Image (cartoon, rainbow, N blue to C red):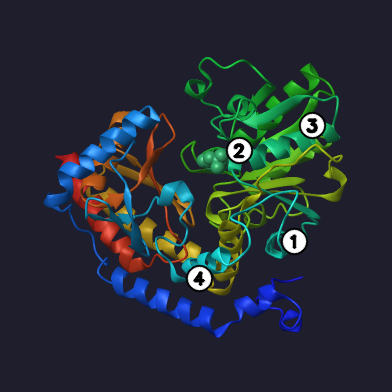
Amino acid sequence: MSSPATETNTEQVLAASRLALDPRIEQAKKLILEAVAEHQSSLAEIRGADESLAAEYQQVLDSFGKLRGGNLYFPYLASGIGNGPFVELADGSVKLDLITGIGVHGFGHSDPRLIEAGIEAALCDTVMQGNLQQGVNSVDLVSLLCETANESGAGIDHCFLSTSGAMANENALKIAFQKNFPANRVLAFDHCFAGRTLCLAQITDKAAYRVGLPDTIAVDKLPFFDHKDPEGSTQRAVEALQQHTSRYPGQHALLWMELIQGEGGYYLGHRDFFVALIDEAKKHNIAIIADEVQTFCRTSRPFAFQHFELDQLVDIITIGKISQVCATLFRDDYNPKPGLISQTFTGSTWAILAAQKIVKSLIDDGNFGPDGKNMMLFNHFESGLKAISQKYPSALTGPHGIGGMVAFTPGNGSADAAKAFVGKMYDAGLMSFMAGANPARVRFLMPLGCVTTDHIDIALKIIESVAAEMAS
Ligand SMILES: Cc1ncc(COP(=O)(O)O)c(C=O)c1O
């Protein structure tokens, strides 16, 4: 099935198709996109705030901080327009955004393809779609996601949409618990991040995010892969898994895996490590869940489980962030009983249309593959960071990450050093964020649909000048 706008044989029957193909709509779209292009063309470089807007901007920030019960991390309020990785703030400044809302704005700001999707969505009958009433575009999206997941023979049969990574993850947990009832324990890695619901806060390995919360599920931890000791770390993780499963026989419902630790600080796993753990877990019928909320579309393949060649080994996968709509994908033998997963909202119509454009464009534009854009952009960023590290080793080490996920360790790796580095770069017009602890890292989640090596070079100049300042 495909949406009314593209299905010519529905043209005579459906008013929606006739509306989508109405020449006035085409003309309006053209005019809107022309106007956006004209106004965004002035936003092609970093610039400072306009002094005449400073006092009012500060007032708005202060009152927002009061209303939401705490100040924003960055004094950042977007004006509503940008140009690729450049974004205009309401104080008139222009920032180079390489953190993209922690991986959400994968096509940067005011991307014409997504604006077009927005116009098409505005012409649809509802703002939101939900489980009771969905549009044909939801069908197109879940088909695309299943097809993409099955590119190398994964055998994923189902895809359930939701509005946040946490909700996609909650659905994954519920599906696995129901399938493996009465097993009710979880295996998860040290330093992982899974979300902030009452349940996911137990899996997320950060004590501060659980302060004052009741224990909801029992989680047994496994050490993550250590690239400095591949065999030893694999053995330790398998032994930990064996200890947990023999201490609580038959009680583990699932193994929760972030294949590349995101919030934990951009640590990569390894195929052999995952295979060893999965082999052991499968002996106990434990469901294998890959949390790809942060990694989706950021490695050499659309899914990180494909990058690590785990196609036949994962049972449930969750995605989010860059896809705008979040989703839980799963095999048929995990299909839950009716009523277990359902939501009022599955996503906004714009998010659903944008998700399709994003996934299709990244595939068509050559972002994937061992020599695709994702890996090429990373290599460029990595070699620039290595050069800076050689010049200022006391200020910057690493780099780390893969594809659209880039990180380095600032100074002595303390939280203060990371905060200072991020803050100085922000003041110079470059947006990044922290990740991990001991060491804390500075990270970038590049807008892979629009970023070029020229943009990375601008970022590298700023990073170098901050490193020089930190080193002195
Ligand atoms: C790996 C991972 N899982 C889950 C989540 C939670 O997603 P959300 O913030 O959309 O609920 C995140 C968010 O950072 C994440 O990185």
Q: Position of residue 93 (x, y in %)?
A: 22, 54
Mark 2 vs mark 1: in front: 2
Res 411 visible: no
Using the image, tell me which numbered label, if any, was put on residue 12.
none
Camera-near label (4 vs 1) is: 4
Q: Which residue is mark 2?
A: 166
Q: Mark 3 — residue?
A: 177
| Label whose residue precedes the other's in the sequence (3 or 2) | 2
Q: Secondary structure at mark 2?
A: helix
How far apart are labels 4 and 2 at the CA level? 28 Å
Counting from the top left corner in percent of width and height, residue 311 is at: 74, 54
> Type of residue at label 4?
Glu
**148 relative position to 80: left or right:** right
Cα separation between marks 3 and 1: 24 Å
Q: Secondary structure at mark 4?
A: helix
Out of 466 and 29, give the one closest to the viewer.
29
Q: Residues within 10 Å of mark 4 (few under 14, many from 20)?
A: some
State how far apart marks 4 and 3 are (Cα). Answer: 41 Å
- Identify the residue under disc 4: 116
Q: Earlier in the sequence, mark 4 or mark 3?
A: 4
Q: Which residue is mark 1?
A: 150
The answer to whether residue 377 is seen in the rendering is yes
